[in-house]
Each structure stands twice: as structure tokens, then as C-alpha cells.
Image (cartoon, helix red, strand yellow):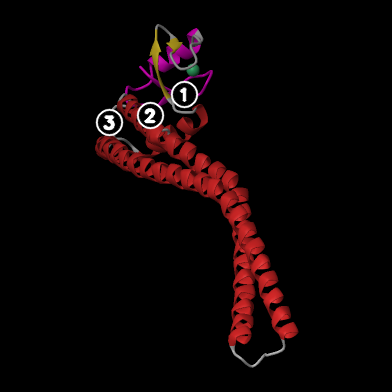
Amino acid sequence: MSSSPARLLDLQELDITIDQLRHRRANLAQRAELKRLAAAATDAAKAIRPVVDERSELARREKRLEDDAATVNDKATSENKRLYSGTVTSPRELQAIHEEIESLKRRQRELEDHALDLMAQIEPLDATIADSERAQRERDAHVEAVTDQLTIAEAEIDAELESFADKRSAVVAELDPSVVAQYESLRATFGGVAVARLEQGSCKGCHIKLSSVEFDRVKHEPIDAVVHCEHCGRILIR
Ligand SMILES: [Zn+2]
């Protein structure tokens, strides 16, 4: 079970590599690109909304004008029928109907002209909306491509992580669980570096020299004993 605490350095090296891989996975360039594309889509949607609203308002008005023109046309048609039905014989009344038809036709033309004006106003809005939709389709295609790239990049890192996790398990299996627990807790405290070499009387974690009394004491500890730096508390590897 228990082996030399020096194996902790191997464990730490593996953990640092695993942390780096996780960091790389979390910060893949594709993630930033997807975020940028999503923000661009939101901005574009916001920008086009008033244009779509204006277009539907103009279309609503245009439709109403066309409906009104159709109603006026129906009226003119029925007046026209009445004019030639033979049921009206009074010249004055016939003249009145004739004038009414002329007036209805003028009204119909006005309504239709107004509707055409609105159609002319709608045209450039339709072009703007079509441009916006095309840009969104391009963004969608880009999102799809970047998502694929991201999936591939993640899978590559995951495969590496898996292989390092296996190596880690093998090292952990050699170590005393209580030493591993100490290591884990120190690692959390020191943001990654829990184990340091003792070189020329100095802790390579905090770079402070051990006192001569402490150095002497540490030197005489059994080789498999876990000793800590008197300054920073890291596990020292002799
Ligand atoms: Zn130290």
C-alpha cells in the first residue's frame, strides 16, 4: 500500500496536468466564438424587430385599403347592374346612378393608389428583413460548424483526461490514503502545489530556508515519514 512520499510529486504532476487540461477544455476558443455568435444573433433580432413591426403595420393598413377598394368596387358593380337593369327609367335617377358610379370609381382608384404607396414603402423593409434572415442563416451554419469543432476538441481532451485519470488512480493506489487526504487538503489550500522538494535546506514551495534545528530534525525522520515545511506547511520531499 504505502510507498515513498516522493510518489506524491508524481501525483501532483499528474494533477497539475489534469487541471491544465480541464482549464483548456473550459476555455476552448470555440466556446468564446459560440458566445459571440449568440450575442450577435440577439443584437440582430433586436435590431430587426422594429422593422418587422413597421412592416406588419403597413401591411395591415394596405390590406384594409384593398378591402375597402373591393367593397367600393362591389358597390359600383351593383350600381352598374342597376343602371342597365331596365328597372330604373327616370333620366334623372339614371343620371344620379351614373354619377354615383363615377364617384365610386374615383374612390376606388384613390384607395388603390394609397395601397400602392404602402406597397412601395413595404418593399425596402422586405429587403432589409430578407438580409437579416440571410445573415441569421449564415450565423446558424457557422454555429453548427463551430459546435462540431467544439465537440471534437472536447472529445480529444476527454480522452487525454481519461488516460491521466487512470495514471492518477495507479499512483493513488500506491499511497497511504491518509497521506493522499493530507495532500488533497493542502492542494486546495495552496491552489495546486501541495508538495515541494527540500533542496539545500530550502522549501521549494515557499522558497524559505528551514531553521537548522528543523532541518536537522527532518533529516533524521524515517524516509517514509511525511514531513511538512515549518513555514508554509507543504509536504516536503527529501
Ligand atoms: Zn515551505
> Is residue 19 rendered to the left or right of residue 42?
left
Assign the N terminus to one quadrant of the image. top left
Secondary structure beneath dot 1 equals loop
- Relative vertical location of residue 125 with respect to residue 226 in this rendering, above or below: below
Q: Taking the image as drawn, is residue 28 in sight?
A: no
Please tell me whether mark 3 or mark 1 is closer to you in this view. 1
Q: Residue at x 66, y 61 (%)?
A: 110
**Disc 1: which residue:** 234
Label 1: how many Cα within 10 Å (few below 14, some 14–19, many 20+)? many
The segment highlighted magenta reads 212-238
The crowd level at tag 2 (other Cα within 10 Å; few <14, some 14-19, many 20+) is: few
Q: For ligand 1, tell me if the residue under mark 1 lies within 8 Å.
A: yes
What type is the residue that disc 2 sits on?
Gln
Q: Residue at x 43, y 8 (%)?
A: 201
Tag 1: amino acid: Arg
Mark 3 to mark 1: distance in Å? 18 Å
Q: Which mark is residue 3?
A: 3
Give the spatial CA distance, label 3 vs label 2: 27 Å
Residue 3 occupies which quadrant of the picture? top left
| Mark positioned earlier in the residue sequence (3 or 1) | 3
Residue positioned 42% across, 17% down in the render: 218
Going from the N terminus, do you reach mark 2 or mark 1 first? 2
- Residue 179 bears which disc, if any? none
| Rendered location of residue 178, percent (x, y) | 39, 38
Membership of 49 in magenta stretch? no
Beta carbon at label 2 within 8 Å of ligand 1: no
Residue 136, picture quadrant: top left
Is residue 8 rendered to the left or right of residue 203?
left
